[in-house]
Image (cartoon, helix red, strand yellow):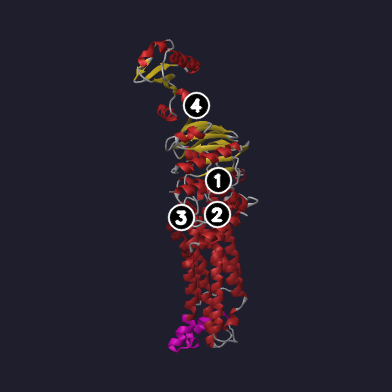
Amino acid sequence: MRVRALVLKEFLDLQRNRGALLPVALVMLLSLGMPFVITIGVPLATSQHLGEDPGLVRVSASAGPHGELSADARVQFFLFQQFLMLFLMTPITAAMALAAHAIVGEKQARTLEPLLATPVTTGELLIAKVLGALLPTSAISFAGVALYFAGIAMLGAPGVLRAMITPRTALLVFVIGPAVALVSLQAAIVISSRVNDARTAQQFGVLIIVPLAAVLVAQFVGTLWLSTGALGFIGLGLFGVWMLLALLSVAVFDRESILTRWR
Amino acid sequence: MISANRLTKRFGSRTAVNDVSLEIGRSEIVALLGPNGAGKTTTLRMLAGLIAPTSGTVAIDGVQLTRSTGSMLRSRIGFLTEAPGVWDRLTVRENLMIYARLYALERPKRAVDGMLERLEMTDRSGARAAELSKGLRQKVSLARALLHEPTILLLDEPTSGLDPEITRSVRRLLAERREAGCAILVSTHNLDEADRIADRVAVLHERLIAVDPPATLRRRLATGRILVRIAGDPSRYADVVRRFDPNVSIEGSVLTLRAPEDDLERTPALVAALVAAGAEILEVRHETPALEDVYLHLVSDR
């Protein structure tokens, strides 16, 4: 009940401050547009087929044989799979924009003290802050993924969309995506509880992008292809990390310091 | 009822509150006075369970405030913070509805409507908090503190910066809550307010210097003098007054005589004697110090 009330407050606040979601929407639009420019637009503009590039053909083999697809379609499939990872960036952007501001923002607006004077517990407050940022950004992220697949259906080579619909993709979209979001949001909340201005929280929070970018680059150069099983383990690991961070965020949330020492 | 038992709070080497014991009963308003930095807000925060005392305890209706009882006991407390702390982008109604749900009220909408009506804010319920004047924001935060009908009210400067009309409505509301059995602690710099609303006044300067009803505090500085203002020349009646005090003094149209606190029953006899002597009495009053004088005396004495 109390968590629901606080999440509602976050939604109402966001509804009146849509600009806060602008970075998330921009990242989503970039994630949506860039794959089609590279995979469809550039080959069309240069009249060079993706399947004729030996480097790309070699790298795309790491995504599996997919003998039913043409050479062009195999490369497209590989690239569309890799670009799917970009959608994981969307909630991270949200974490920076919303969650980093969560506690610091309440403190700076002097709204935290009356809130802490209610029966709300630290755990409830922090869960609400995470959900308040996670739900809208996940909605934007899922909408982006849906548009992405619609684009592949319309512009991709025959068979690419069908090849894309796999347990691996589902795992990426429905497990890894939310898990990465949870970890990044929770990390941002931990940071937001320990620093006394939102900019510092954002600067620390942006570090979460580093491991994700490393995975993305490794996949693009073909040195790493995360299988369905590997992604499953990573998903479990991420949820584990999230739970640890959730416990940590409650432990490090020092009401007294926040109320008496932050200015 | 809320009681503080030997509360001490230190921030590093600085002691903000030292060994404060105070009990506020049902249907009682206690005004907490003290200079800036005297520890008033820290005391209120400890009583509200927002910060833990370095030593000492707080109990509400006999239940000690601890980490495990904090959430449950906070539901009995209405806490008005120094700053209104309302969510600017939300409307007045939305602000209150969120809090009504945080306090798990059975009929949140009804509670909010009722409170808006009591504070004469129904017509502003759809306004965003950012659009409100300081006074109205303060009213919203007061509504928020009262929404769940707490048995304990802790108010930090509730009328600071408010216009006289809103101030009066706030005081009326506090009087209503007192009638309803609430134990109320009001931190204020406004001595007139303390005098008007408080049953007892607690003067804090790191330690509690005094806790007494305003009249009792005043007696500490009482001069024990009666002032009689008379039309015409007062010296004509000096002999009459000397029967009551041989050391009567005359200044302008005023005769001043000493009258100890326990000897005030002589006043009617004095008035009768003066009237019998033909004096036209314009005013008779016992000189009592203002609460401000008592407060300044207590604080400077420390």
The chain identifier of the residue carrying mark 2 reads B
User: Mark 3 or mark 2, which is nearer the start of the sequence?
Assistant: 2
Cα–Cα gap, marks 1 and 3: 21 Å
Q: Nearer the viewer, residue B34 or B88?
A: B88
Q: What element carries label 3?
A: helix
State if disc 3 and disc 2 touch (CB < 8 Å).
Answer: no
- Position above or below: B115 against A8: above
Cα–Cα gap, marks 2 and 1: 14 Å
Residue marked by disc 2? B93
User: Mark 4 or mark 3, which is nearer the start of the sequence?
Assistant: 3
Residue at mark 2 shares a chain with residue at mark 4:
yes
Q: What element carries label 1?
A: helix
Q: How far across and down, in percent of the image, does residue B26 sit?
A: 60, 35
Q: What element carries label 4?
A: helix
What amino acid is at disc 3?
Glu
What amino acid is at disc 1?
Ala
Residue at mark 2 shares a chain with residue at mark 3:
yes
